[in-house]
Image: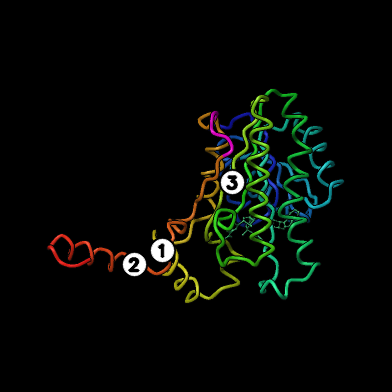
Amino acid sequence: MELKGKTAIVTGSARGIGEGIALVLAREGATVVVNSRKAKDCEQMVQKIVSLGGKAIAVAGDVSKKADVTAMVAETIRQLGAVDILVNNAGIEGTPCLAADLSEEQWDRTLGVNLKGVFFCCQAVIPQMIKQGQGRIVNIASTAAIRMTFFGSLDYTVSKHGVAGLSQHLAWELADSHITVNTVCPGGVHTPLMESGTTPEYREMTIKRLVPLGRFTTMEEIGEAVSFLASDRAATITGQMLAVDGGLLTGFGEDLRPTVRQRMAAMKAGGKH
Ligand SMILES: NC(=O)c1ccc[n+]([C@@H]2O[C@H](COP(=O)([O-])OP(=O)(O)OC[C@H]3O[C@@H](n4cnc5c(N)ncnc54)[C@H](O)[C@@H]3O)[C@@H](O)[C@H]2O)c1
């Protein structure tokens, strides 16, 4: 229970990775502010957290709208009196397409939620965190923030690279207020949405070709990384990007380990390499 007494806003936490983060933070004792666009979805997640013995309140709002974000933070402070942790998780992928076919509308929508939304939420909590003398901001980007991957199109990659830049800049700017800002970069995460949108064969093929550890990350495992970065154990970690990706960014697509081992054995035996 290392987050006991803390208040944590988790955007986009009515389902998916946000749900995993909300459940882990609540398990660690934080009171979670469940946010998503629809109030009913937020209420359902609050009930789930409460049924598991945790504490949560629902505050709906669209992170890409500044007025919604201002109202969400004001409501949090009104009900709970503090904002100790902000997790910017809400994000969209957009319709997969090639750059030549990317519409201005999709560009604006993806960057509006994935990047401007993160900016609005950070900007809204900073004065409160400065007043409290400390704070933790954890932004959920993607491996697409570190290296281009084929997850998502150009707009998605650009938005997540933007989150990386925003996080690093804020980490520096807020360090003397004892506010840390870090970025978690998931690779493939098994969410209900992924399950409903892909076949088991496609998932198996993707894992085999991309993930050295041999499976997707769970929603809760992303929550564990966030929980650590939000805890006192991570007090001097700021401006960092943590890939939670099963080894995806090691860069080997196909599983090349048998070939590499064979080559090493040949070299050891004095053969060509
Ligand atoms: N699932 C993956 O494999 C994966 C991999 C890398 C990064 N990510 C990132 O993780 C985050 C969560 O992804 P997910 O797979 O759980 O997605 P998801 O679609 O399952 O859940 C996203 C949640 O955010 C909410 N949301 C969307 N737009 C919003 C807005 N404007 N305002 C408030 N809430 C909004 C949705 O209603 C939903 O509850 C995203 O930032 C995504 O880019 C996901």
According to the picture, the residue beneath numbered tag 3 turns out to be 23
Between the C-alphas of marks 1 and 2, the distance is 7 Å
Label 1 secondary element: loop
Q: Are marks 1 and 2 in contact (CB under 8 Å)?
A: yes
**Closer to the camera: disc 2 or disc 3?**
2
Q: Could you say which disc has been placed on residue 16 in the image?
A: none
Q: Residue furthest front?
A: 272
The residue pinned by badge 1 equals 252
Quarter of the displayed picture in which ligand 1 can be seen:
bottom right
Mark pair 3, 1: CA separation: 33 Å
Given the image, on which type of amino acid does mark 3 rest?
Answer: Leu
Image quarter for residue 265?
A: bottom left
| Residue at far right of view | 67
Residue segment shown in magenta: 235-239
- Amino acid type, residue under disc 1 in the picture: Phe
On screen, residue 36 versus residue 219, left or right, reads right
Query: Is residue 242 shown above or below 84?
Result: below
Left or right, 208 with reference to 17:
left
Residue 44 place in picture, x, y as percent: 70, 53
At x 62%, y 66%, the residue is 152
Q: Is residue 180 above or below residue 257?
A: above
- Residue 254 at x, y percent in the picture: 40, 69
**Identity, as a three-letter code, of the amino acid under mark 2:** Leu
Instruction: Give residue 184's position: percent from left, percent from top.
Output: 57, 47
